Amino acid sequence: MNDIRVLVAGASVAGPAVAHWLHRFGAEITVVERADALRPGGQAVDARGIAKDVIRRIGLDAAVRAACTYTLGAHTVDADGNVLDTVRADDGDGDGYIAEIEILRGDLSQVLYDATRDDVEYIFGDRITSLTHDLDGVDVTFDSGLARRFDFVIGADGLHSSLRAMVFGPREQYVRHLGHVLSFYTVPNEFGLDGWAVEYSESGRTAGLRPVPDASRAIAMLSFPAGDVDVDYRDADALKRLLRARMDGFGWLTPRILDHLEDAPDLYLDQVAQVVMERWSSGRVGLLGDAAFCSSPFSGQGTGLALVGAYVLAGELAAADWDPTVGFARYEARMRPFVEANQEIGRLNVRFRNAEPGTAPEEWDMNLIDRALNGIELPDYLGKRA
């Protein structure tokens, strides 16, 4: 073990993943999370393409697959529930719209936490309030009053990253709204879901239901076009009012889904957005995952980018013998084409959702899809250090 000390902000997916790799490369890791505990449930997220290789390299393939939703596929239906189209989880070698590795975000976070908790210091219910960095390290003050010095600080604290705002400037400089709002929450499975996701869309609005491992529950997903919504994603009452207003009159099972909104234990609603930055590092502070390069939920690749980015960020820093200038530069150079391909997928999906009914969809660029799934080389960083 060397004397490199790294602070990671955020304990969802990107944070524990980068903590794993940084520890493997010999650093001493602290993860700080503002929530009091891991947040359960959440959206179903997927691992496709090269992200599955990263899961295998971590050694968590069996654990992740055991926690999967085991969704068989998805039906697109009309307002009466008649099936219009079907996709299966084994389409496209398991990398299609419904991926073979589909897992609730909270369950993936738990798997990663369980794999790192013995080697990594986790601090829950606290957050970074200030930091100053010089050529040799970063002095950090926490909300609890704790003050410590680290060699590196990594921001893995999501789309609304407070660390990004602290070091790089206001969120408005980097967050690009895509003209949609997405919401999801847990509901009782009174809809007869039997392993298949179901989705109904009309004029840009969408309502859907997805199965979870607990057959008595399901995840409701609602989305609507909105270029003029200023969402306070922490105000649950305001989010509920907005969702009811924007989904009012929508067909299929939507009224029954909205009946469960008041008692939703895990309501999420936010603008569909991407993060676009010219650089993901400043001195000894770096960004990762949605904090650096959110591709939006409509890309289906946010989790893959987080897992791959964690491996590359940690690996490049270690390969550069912990030189921040060299390590961060190589991380950005290796990741940026992969990120840009996935962000383009997210923007294309928004255009498809906004298409007028009966309009022929654009043809997917299969080369773009391949670059979004596998368009990055993953060096054997551990082998190089052997």
Image (spheres, rainbow, N blue to C red):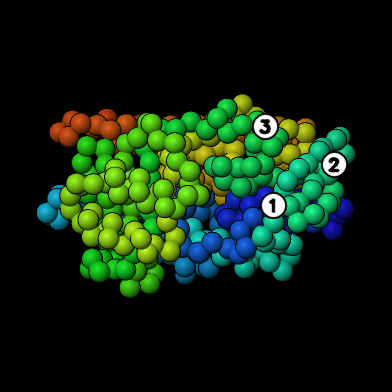
- Label 1 sits on a secondary structure element that is loop
Residue 349 percent coordinates (x, y): 34, 36
Quadrant where the image shows the N terminus? bottom right
Q: Give me the disc on residue 127.
A: 1
Residue 224 percent coordinates (x, y): 31, 41
- Whether residue 347 is visible: no
Q: Give me the disc on residue 168.
A: 3
Position of residue 220 in the picture relative to residue 149 (left or right): left
Query: Quarter of the image holding residue 284?
Result: top right
Q: Are marks 3 and 1 in contact (CB under 8 Å)?
A: no
Residue 125 percent coordinates (x, y): 66, 60
Position of residue 144 in the picture relative to residue 43 (left or right): right
- Type of residue at label 1? Arg
Q: Label 3: few (<14), some or many (≥20) within 10 Å? A: some
Viewer-proximal residue, 376 or 255?
255
- Sequence-first tag of 2 and 3: 2
Q: Nearer the viewer, mark 1 or mark 2?
A: 1
Q: CA distance from mark 2 to mark 3?
A: 17 Å
Residue 178 percent coordinates (x, y): 41, 32
Viewer-proximal residue, 248 or 97?
248
